[in-house]
Amino acid sequence: MSAVNERSDEGNEGGQFPRRHFLIALAAGLWRPRAPMAQLQSKRQVSQLPVRVSTLNHVSVGCADLRSTVQWYGRVFGMPVHAFQDYGGGQTVLRIGDGPAYMALSQRNPNSIGQQPSRRPHFCWGVEDFNVDRILRALSEMQAPAQAVLREGKTINGVNFDDPDGFPLQFNPVNACGGGGFLGDVCDTAAQAARLPGSLPPIPVRTLNHVKLVVPNVQRTLEWYLRLTDMRRQTYQEPAEGPRTPGYEGPPIPILRVGSGPQFIALVEGSGPAAFRPHVGFGVQGFAPDQIKARLAEHGVIARTRLREGATTEILVDAPDGVEIQLQDVSYCGGRGPLGNMCG
């Protein structure tokens, strides 16, 4: 599930279909016998772009202390462990709300703890009618080397690739929950977060609302994402003409709607350590900032409140392992108004 360390230059150019991609396509019923050369040449001229994305499927994070981090998310946000992956050294999979969206946590190498991560944050889209061959062809058009493997020898691990800024990305079947089965859609739906007797109730997060990426050139990255996928630019935060949040300096922040929304990706221009810090937005039903802050304080969690552009209250939490969590209403689309749910 997580960002794959190895990257393959084997695409699908020139009609070549690497063996591991063939095995996945064959098992998924996606492979067809070789067609006449004229038909193949005609097919090569048909663009597979854009890739149609429906959801934000998951995010993944490396942890200094996996056990305590899993307990923290269960205690504070009520996120249960509903799957485990042996792939890539092991991934503990936490369900977000009712799923299939999830957060995958892995144990970092002890030698890397205390050092700045060498990889940028990872996230994954969910794709309807998931087709490995079609996605690999699309990425070949983007000149983005990609890899598709069978996790644990039996489960499609989506298609992994990097964007031009070095963010490890992934396409998954839309119903993948990080579990077993061929499409990774078999998880423990009855799983509940472990709680000690008498423990405080959590702040139940319902949705994976958004991710924020810090990129060196926001216009270049925006154009790349709009070519790769069918995401649409639905609004800008911090517009040049105002209003602006006190302290913000930089170009306007494009908000890219994922599927029918309100899930989105925000692109912020910047560099340095901020580009390596995961920022994940969770949606909360019936968002009440004061109540949420009081509940977080009961859990010993310090939250910051920001009034974006003088109108939208946003709650930011420093989670373990340097992750910044943003809590908003489930309707939050990165737009305007008290709940940030007014998007053009």
Image: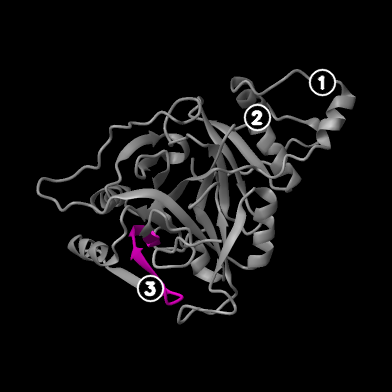
Q: Residue at x 45, y 48 (%)?
A: 60
Residue placed under numbered mark 2 in the picture = 21
Q: In this view, does 99 lie to the left or right of 274?
A: left
Question: Where residue 27 sits: x, y (%)?
Answer: 59, 20
The residue lying at 65 percent from left, 54 percent from top is 225
C-alpha distance separating marks 3 and 1:
58 Å
Return the residue nearer the eye: 67 or 170. 170
Please give the label number shown on residue 306: 3
The dominant secondary structure in magenta is strand
Secondary structure beneath dot 3 equals strand
Q: Hey, what amino acid is under mark 1?
A: Ala
Question: Where does residue 226 sit, x and y in percent of width and height?
Answer: 67, 54
Looking at this view, name the residue that lies furthest to the right.
38
Residue drawn at the location 39% of the way across and 58% of the way down:
113
| x then y, percent, for residue 232 | 62, 54
- Asked if residue 225 lies in the magenta stretch, the reply is no
Q: Over which residues does the magenta segment extend? A: 306-327
Can residue 297 be seen?
A: yes
Q: Quadrant of residue 136?
A: top right
The quarter holding residue 43 reads top right
Determine which residue is flagged by label 1: 35
